[in-house]
Amino acid sequence: MNKNKNIIETAKETILIEADAIKQLAELVNEDFEKAVMTILNSEGRVIVTGIGKSANIASKIVATMNSTGTPAVFMHAADAIHGDLGNIQKDDVVICISKSGNTPEIKVLLPLIKNYGNKIIAITGNESSFLGEHADHTLSSFVEKEACPNNLAPTTSTTAQLVIGDALAICLLNLKDFSSSDFAKYHPGGTLGRKLYLRVNELAEKNEVPQVEEHTPIKDVINEISKKRLGSTAVVSDGYIVGIITDGDIRRMLENSVDLKELKAKDIMSSNPVTVSSDTMAVNALDIMQKNNITQILVTKDKKYTGVVHFHDLLKEGII
């Protein structure tokens, strides 16, 4: 047997088993899901997410997703909860308990304690008729027919299903709160993602030279300006306003035509009405404009006056691409 082929087949089978299980989850979403979302939305407290074993790992990820999408959440391990961490739960908090079977000893001990505090409980479980399913205020089914594990033992498909239910909760809450990309940026200021959400073109342009010539500038001086400023182009301006652009490509095409350069001026080879962006444009949006127009540099303006250039390489260095 080709062992490598067997590996590929096993990988594909695992993915398809989990994909089918996720599709079936959509059929299990009912009014209780809607009620659970509204319970969280209307709560003045946080969301406490708890579980045991692999479900605890999923609980931790759901907490991270909720926190990053505007729903304050805290992870609490079910085993630690019954040994002192119950103090994490405050008066108006909503508790999400995750358990495939819904009948683990820790869950059976934990649920009555939470109920004594008067907190609402949302269950994510593969067994709606379990202790957890029957004692929760809202029960969200994460039922799967089988694990991807060939022995049907290792939590694989079931934990994927739990994660998907958690994502669905987070996205529903995000939509109801009108959580925008600028809101998202507040929670992701670092790394490449933060740069994409925060960086504006003026921050890039101010690091570059500002190549510019006037309409009647001789071509020799235009070439010198482009070479000296090293951005592959120069703006053609009049009283600070952009009237055109000349790029390396324009220079090459001019030379290919073997014209007499002595009398040639900037206005003779410039492209009128070049693509521009205002200085407060998001860098990622500027990239989109450059790609749609098939250009490698874009002119920047402030109050309609020319302020600089952003080159494709600037975006590349910042990790925007």
Image (cartoon, rainbow, N blue to C red):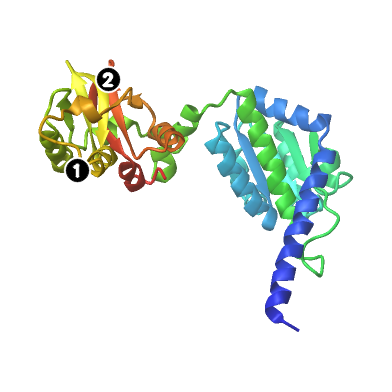
Local secondary structure at mark 2: strand
Percent position of residue 147, x then y: 79, 60
* In front of the other: 153 or 137: 153
Q: Write the residue at 12% across / 39% down.
A: 224
Number of labelled discs?
Answer: 2
Q: Is residue 282 above or below residue 134?
A: above
Q: Nearer the viewer, residue 301 or 236?
A: 236
Residue 207 at least partly seen: yes
Q: Residue at x 79, y 46 (%)?
A: 23
Give the labeled residue for mark 2.
Answer: 302
> Residue at image x 33%, y 26%?
274
Amino acid type at image mark 2: Lys
**Mark 2 vs mark 1, CA separation in Å:** 22 Å
Identity of the amino acid at label 1? Answer: Arg
* In the foreground, 163 or 315: 315
- Quarter of the image for residue 40 reads top right
Residue 91 seen in this snapshot: no
Residue 102 lies left or right of residue 200; in this view the side is right
Question: With 109 as the anchor, is 70 left or right in this view?
Answer: left
Classify mark 2: residues with Cα within 10 Å, few (<14), some (14-19) or many (20+): few
Q: Earlier in the sequence, mark 2 or mark 1?
A: 1
In the image, residue 200 above or below residue 227: above
Q: Quadrant of residue 114?
A: top right
Tell me whether circle 2 and circle 1 mark residues in contact (CB < 8 Å): no
Q: Residues within 10 Å of mark 1 (few under 14, many from 20)?
A: some
Point out the residue furthest to the right here. Answer: 129
Residue 176 picture location, percent across and down: 64, 24
Quadrant in the picture for the N terminus: bottom right
Q: Which residue is mark 1?
A: 230
Image position, residue 58 (x, y; %): 65, 51
Percent across and percent down for residue 256 are 25, 44
Depth-wise, is mark 2 or mark 1 nearer the camera? 1
